[in-house]
Image (spheres, rainbow, N blue to C red):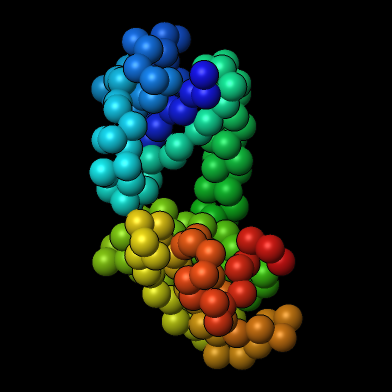
Amino acid sequence: MKHAILVTPQAIIAKTYGRENNGLFIYKNDEFVPISPQEVETHRLTIQSKGWRTVKGDSKEAAMTTLLDRLAVEIAEKKELEALLQLDVIPTTIGNLQILMNHLNSFNWGLWTLPRMSVGYSAQQYDCDGSLATTVILDRPLNGRTHFVLGGKRGHLTKYTDIGRL
């Protein structure tokens, strides 16, 4: 059986995983609570917009290992973001743009406060059939490109370069 765990990024992993329920759980109130596959599909956009993550594995242990690896990466990215936000003007590089777009894609655009970058830009957020996408358009080309996207589904926002593939 494949297992999936939905968990908030701020979660501290509990010692117990909760009850079996098709291998699907949501981590809240310091415990894993079973969730049905229908609830996952019905609330997919809500789950993404709240910053929750989906993790899958061949076992609960494999899913937890994947989750812990992802949380370690998120913590490192958060530290990089905090360092960038300390600057008056963020240098516009592919790496810095990717960190910024990951940050922006993690919450609703209505809460954004865009930091100043060395190249002017505009940013938008879209719902691509239930998958959030963040786009950035630069005033000057970076590596020959001005339109970048993070997230979304294939076939959407095709005029943008997927920053994750650079």
Vertically, is 147 above or below 13?
below
Residue plotted at (37% across, 69% down)? 126
The quarter holding residue 99 reads: bottom right
Instruction: Give the number of marks.
Output: 0
Residue visible at 60% across and 85% down in the picture: 146
Q: Residue at x 26, y 22 (%)?
A: 29
Please tell me which residue lies in front, 53 or 90: 53
Horizontal and vertical percent position of residue 8: 38, 35
- Residue 49 horizontal side relative to residue 2, left or right: left
Q: Residue furthest bottom?
A: 140
Q: Is residue 75 above or below residue 118?
A: above
Where does the image place residue 131, in percent across and percent down from the top left? 40, 57
- Residue 104 vertical position relative to residue 68 in the rendered view, above or below: below
Left or right of 22, for residue 43: left
Residue 33 shows in this picture = yes
Q: Report whether residue 89 is seen.
A: no
Q: Quadrant of residue 114?
A: bottom left
Q: Position of residue 35 (x, y in %)?
A: 30, 26
Q: Is residue 145 left or right of residue 28?
A: right
| Image quadrant in which you'd find residue 166 | bottom right
